[in-house]
């Protein structure tokens, strides 16, 4: 009997112990279930995959950032459709249109022309084809003073013209500061020197502000051996070459050709002679001038009178006689100037320069 009584007590104690144990467990769960540790365990998977923002953070922490943005394509899709490397642009651009009709509406404004080109240009009036690599890097140099409207008409046509030719290019306007006599040739030397400080251009187009090309088959590229003269004809001269050695208006020379002739002379102040001087320099180097066919090399010159400050240069004939003696020491290597400002505006790079006076 004694033994049986003891067993009963022991069984009751065991039951009481189990009851207390489960009560204790219940109290522990209700107390700690809201803690960070438990939440962390519950929410673990969401932290690991994260939101889009987290993914970017992880990406940048891994050294990704802009250079390797996360892609939406699965990796094996990318392997199947890799991005083809850009090819050199075709020899003949498929975008060319040939002759186009030009109009010069007086209502055209700077903001119109900026808007037309907003998507295609980077600051300083530069552009490059999006789907191929241009065959040449071309700098167009325009000497300028007080011809804003002409500049606007030219930019309106020239940007799309150069883009149809699939060129990588930049347009530089070299603006003569002050009101001393104009010097077209020296401004073009400055343009060449300043543009090369920015980029290693292959080809230079020396371009009057008032000449608008009528046909995009007139390519603004350089020939490796021969300097090019691009204005065979223009409206005002019945589209005929003015005279045999005529080399004015728009010319194209490689970086090497222009440096070989020591650029333009700096000595021609006022109107005339500087273009013939450049032709003599080219001939002294035994280079032959190349011209596109007359039906292609056509320009419209926006009408103008002779500007004040660009009076006819009476010394031009005597200067031209001395070119064979002076070209080595008068040109790029003696071009002294001081740059007032370089501004990268949307449609071109404006170089304002003090070039002295006669
Ligand atoms: C001819 C030549 C030109 C040049 C000049 C004599 C043609 C088509 N052009 O032009 O290349 O040899 O004779 O120097 O044959 N300019 C200004 N502001 C001025 C003055 C001139 O911006 O106040 C610039 C402008 O880019 C202009 C260029 O210089 O187009 C030539 O001057 P121009 O147009 O008065 O001379 P033009 O038409 O007789
Ligand atoms: Mn002119």
Image: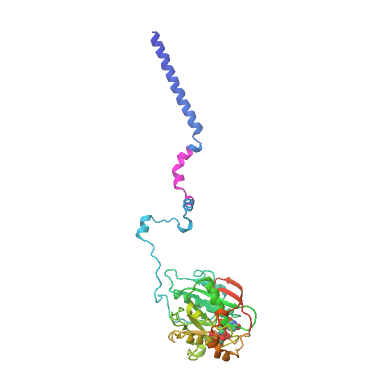
In the foreground, 152 or 342: 342
Magenta stretch, main secondary structure class? helix
* Above or below 352: residue 282: below
* Above or below 49: residue 263: below
Q: Is residue 50 in the magenta section?
A: yes
Quarter placement of the C terminus: bottom right
Q: How many numbered marks have been drawn onto this rendered protein structure? A: 0
Residue 334 percent across, percent down from the top left: 58, 80
Residue 259 percent across, percent down from the top left: 50, 79
In the foreground, 116 or 164: 164
Image side of residue 305 versus residue 251, left or right: right
Q: Which residue is drawn at 58% across and 71% down?
A: 343
Residue 308 percent across, percent down from the top left: 63, 85
Image side of residue 92 versus residue 142, left or right: left
Residue 109 percent across, percent down from the top left: 57, 75
Image side of residue 248 versus residue 135, left or right: right
Q: Which residue is drawn at 45% across and 42% down?
A: 44
**Residues rendered magenta in the picture:** 38-54
């Amino acid at each position: 009997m004694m033994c049986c009584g003891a067993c009963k007590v022991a069984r009751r104690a065991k039951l009481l112990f189990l009851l207390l144990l489960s009560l204790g467990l219940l109290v522990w769960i209700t107390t700690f279930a809201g803690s960070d540790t438990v939440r962390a365990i519950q929410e673990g998977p969401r932290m690991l995959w994260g939101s889009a923002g987290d993914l970017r953070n992880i990406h940048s922490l891994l050294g990704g950032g802009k250079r390797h943005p996360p892609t939406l394509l699965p990796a094996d899709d990318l392997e199947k459709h890799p991005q083809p490397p850009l090819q050199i642009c075709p020899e003949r651009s498929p975008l060319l249109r040939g002759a186009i009709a030009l109009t010069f509406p007086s209502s055209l404004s700077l903001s119109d022309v900026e808007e037309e080109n907003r998507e295609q240009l980077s600051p300083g009036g530069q552009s490059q084809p999006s789907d191929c690599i241009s065959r040449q890097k071309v700098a167009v140099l325009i000497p300028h003073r007080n011809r804003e409207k002409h500049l606007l008409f030219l930019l309106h046509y020239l940007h799309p013209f150069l883009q149809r030719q699939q060129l990588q290019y930049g347009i530089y306007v070299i603006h003569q500061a002050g009101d001393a006599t104009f010097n077209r040739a020296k401004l073009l030397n400055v343009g060449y020197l300043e543009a090369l400080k920015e980029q290693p251009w292959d080809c230079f187009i020396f371009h009057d502000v008032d000449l608008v090309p009528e046909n995009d088959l007139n390519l603004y590229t350089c020939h490796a051996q021969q300097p090019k003269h691009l204005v065979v004809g223009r409206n005002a001269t019945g589209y005929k070459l003015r005279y045999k050695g005529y080399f004015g208006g728009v010319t194209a020379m490689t970086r090497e050709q222009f440096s070989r002739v020591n650029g333009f002379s700096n000595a021609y102040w006022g109107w005339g002679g500087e273009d013939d001087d450049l032709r003599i320099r080219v001939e002294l180097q035994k280079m032959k001038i190349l011209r596109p066919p007359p039906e292609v090399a056509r320009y419209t010159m926006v009408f103008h009178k002779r500007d004040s400050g660009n009076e006819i240069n009476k010394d031009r004939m005597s200067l031209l006689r001395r070119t064979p003696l002076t070209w080595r020491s008068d040109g790029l290597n003696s071009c002294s100037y001081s740059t007032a400002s370089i501004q990268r505006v949307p449609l071109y790079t404006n170089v304002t320069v003090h070039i002295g006076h006669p």
